[in-house]
Amino acid sequence: MALIKCPECGKEISDKSDKCIHCGFPLTKTKNKICIINGKEYDLSFVLDFYKDHPDEKVKLIGTFRRMTNCGLKDAKDVIDKILETNEIPKVLILKQQESSKPKEEYNKPKCPTCGSTNLSKVSTMSKAGSVFMWGLFSQKVKKTWHCNNCKYEW
């Protein structure tokens, strides 16, 4: 237990107190809510607030923390357990980053159905118009949207 100064009256009080014993100033609002995780600042005040309202949904809290920080399940569980046990947000944490097999941008990229490549380009409107001009209504390019730059397949 350490003594700290009250931000309101300046008198010394316990760091474990919820409010100043001299003036009644609430200290829970002045406690640290920002945590630096792997060099990046995160506001983790939601952890204590959410758990106070929903003590049976700790799994959801761990999942939210994992998505926010991109850390592994064990690290997230350990951090959340420590925060809930001590009722304090740590100032600095160094966690292992979760290994991701693909960057998030690659999840929504279309792939060639023939070769699986993502080296694609859209079939241009001019290319479609030229094909209609050459082949008329029997042009197959009108229905195509993508062109694979590797295997030249169009779909």
Image (cartoon, rainbow, N blue to C red):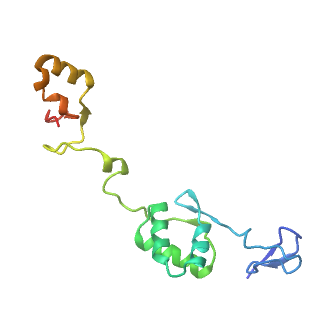
> Picture coordinates of residue 146 (x, y %)?
22, 35
Name the residue furthest top.
133
Q: Name the residue: 60% across, 78% down.
A: 52
| Vertical placement of residue 17 versus 89, above or below | below
Q: What is the x, y in percent for residue 3?
A: 79, 78
Residue 16 image position (x, y, % from top left): 73, 80
Which residue, as the protein is rendered here, is positioned at the far front? 137
Which corner quadrant holds the N terminus? bottom right
The percent coordinates of residue 34 (x first, y second) are 63, 63
Task: Say left or right for 154 vs 34.
Answer: left
For the C terminus, the image quarter is top left
| Closest to the observer, 80 or 122 | 122
In the rendered structure, the answer to whether residue 72 lies left or right of residue 8 reads left
Q: Quadrant of residue 5?
A: bottom right
Q: Give left or right: position of 102 versus 22.
A: left
135 or 56: nearer the viewer: 135
* Near-viewer residue (96 or 21): 21
Q: Residue at x 22, y 44 (%)?
A: 111
Number of residue marks = 0
Front residue of 137/12: it is 137
Instruction: Note whether 151 is above or below 16 in the view shown.
Output: above
The residue shown at (58%, 82%) is 85
- Depicted 99 relative to depicted 151: above or below: below
**Residue at the (10%, 26%) spot, across then down:** 138
